């Protein structure tokens, strides 16, 4: 399958059409961005490690019965996916406090949330992805009631699968962001699951092994992602 024309270029991935109108190619670039694109750097090998980790995680989710857009790997930095019509909201589940919830609610980092909490954000960099609720999503027509219910159900199911998967690799899944789209009338998981869009801490030491290393200027960002891949048993080629 050949990449055709570039449909969209995001902060870390580019999306290409293919000769199949139902399929797209995702190209994972080495670009890394934070703070809605204010901080941008190229980190060698990041595209490859994210592409491979994403392929592995999406495969595990499919096995657990969660529908995803992922088809198969095409190259070190490329994967073939189903072409979804994206729903413009981000679904975030938090198992442990970190990041924006700490600032917003004045809460310290590292508190376990039982039960885990769920938040919706509108995908809009110019507005810094504001938090929205289900009423906003319905009133502005971003998704239907049924789609909202399905996104929440699938996002929590992902939590059940991935919390254990990462724990088995000695990692705590602190929080993560998912994006969904429509495919032939069904809600399907799209975008990616990589250390760029989740928080992962070493279960014993709580060392950060995710994009917070980049956001907080801690260094060894790709090395941390590679450690995640290695602990999951993901071949990087
Ligand atoms: P927070 O709301 O604390 O900034 O983010 C919660 C979780 O969702 C974190 O794991 C974070 O990496 C992820 N997340 C939220 N928004 C975005 C986004 O726009 N891009 C990426 N890559 N991850 C996001």
Image (cartoon, rainbow, N blue to C red):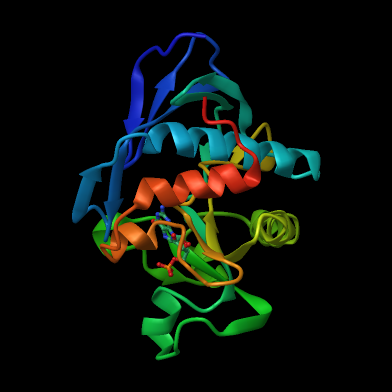
- Please name the residue shown 40% across and 47% down the image: 223
Up the image or down, 26 lies above or below 130; here it is above
Up the image or down, 190 lies above or below 48; here it is below
**Could you say which is closer to the camera, residue 5 or residue 42?**
42
Residue 56, position as x, y percentages in the image: 64, 37
Up the image or down, 228 lies above or below 184; here it is below
**Could you say which is closer to the camera, residue 135 or residue 86?**
86
| 169 with respect to 10 (left or right) | right
Give the total number of marks visible in the rendering: 0
- Please name the residue shown 57% across and 27% down the image: 81
| 141 with respect to 157 (left or right) | left
Q: Pick out the residue farthest to the front.
A: 205
**Could you say which is closer to the camera, residue 146 or residue 60?**
60
Residue 96, position as x, y percentages in the image: 57, 76
Up the image or down, 2 lies above or below 82; here it is above
Residue 211, position as x, y percentages in the image: 39, 57
- Please name the residue shown 57% across and 54% down the image: 143
Q: Quadrant of residue 183?
A: top right
Is residue 227 in sight in this rendering? Answer: yes
Ligand 1 positioned in quadrant: bottom left
- Please name the residue shown 23% across and 52% down the image: 37
Residue 156, position as x, y percentages in the image: 70, 62
| 35 with respect to 163 (left or right) | left
Q: Quadrant of residue 10?
A: top left
Is residue 180 in sight in this rendering? Answer: no
């Amino acid at each position: 399958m050949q990449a055709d024309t570039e449909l969209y270029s995001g902060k870390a991935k580019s999306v290409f059409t293919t000769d199949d109108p139902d399929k797209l190619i995702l190209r994972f670039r080495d670009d890394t961005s934070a703070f809605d694109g204010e901080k941008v750097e190229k980190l060698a090998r990041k595209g490859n490690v994210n592409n491979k980790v994403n392929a592995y995680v999406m495969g595990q989710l499919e096995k657990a019965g969660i529908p995803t857009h992922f088809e198969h790997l095409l190259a070190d930095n490329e994967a073939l996916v189903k072409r979804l019509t994206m729903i413009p909201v981000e679904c975030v589940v938090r198992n442990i406090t970190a990041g924006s919830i700490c600032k917003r609610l004045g809460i310290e980092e590292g508190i376990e949330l039982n039960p885990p909490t769920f938040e919706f954000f509108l995908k809009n960099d110019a507005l810094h992805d504001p938090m929205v609720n289900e009423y906003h999503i319905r009133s502005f027509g971003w998704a239907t009631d049924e789609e909202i219910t399905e996104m929440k159900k699938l996002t929590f199911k992902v939590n059940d699968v991935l919390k254990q998967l990462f724990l088995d690799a000695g990692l705590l899944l602190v929080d993560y962001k998912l994006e969904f789209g429509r495919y032939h009338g069904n809600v399907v998981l799209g975008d990616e699951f990589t250390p760029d869009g989740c928080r992962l801490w070493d279960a014993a030491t709580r060392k950060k092994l995710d994009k917070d290393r980049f956001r907080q200027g801690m260094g060894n960002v790709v090395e941390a992602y590679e450690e995640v891949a290695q602990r999951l048993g993901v071949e990087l080629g």
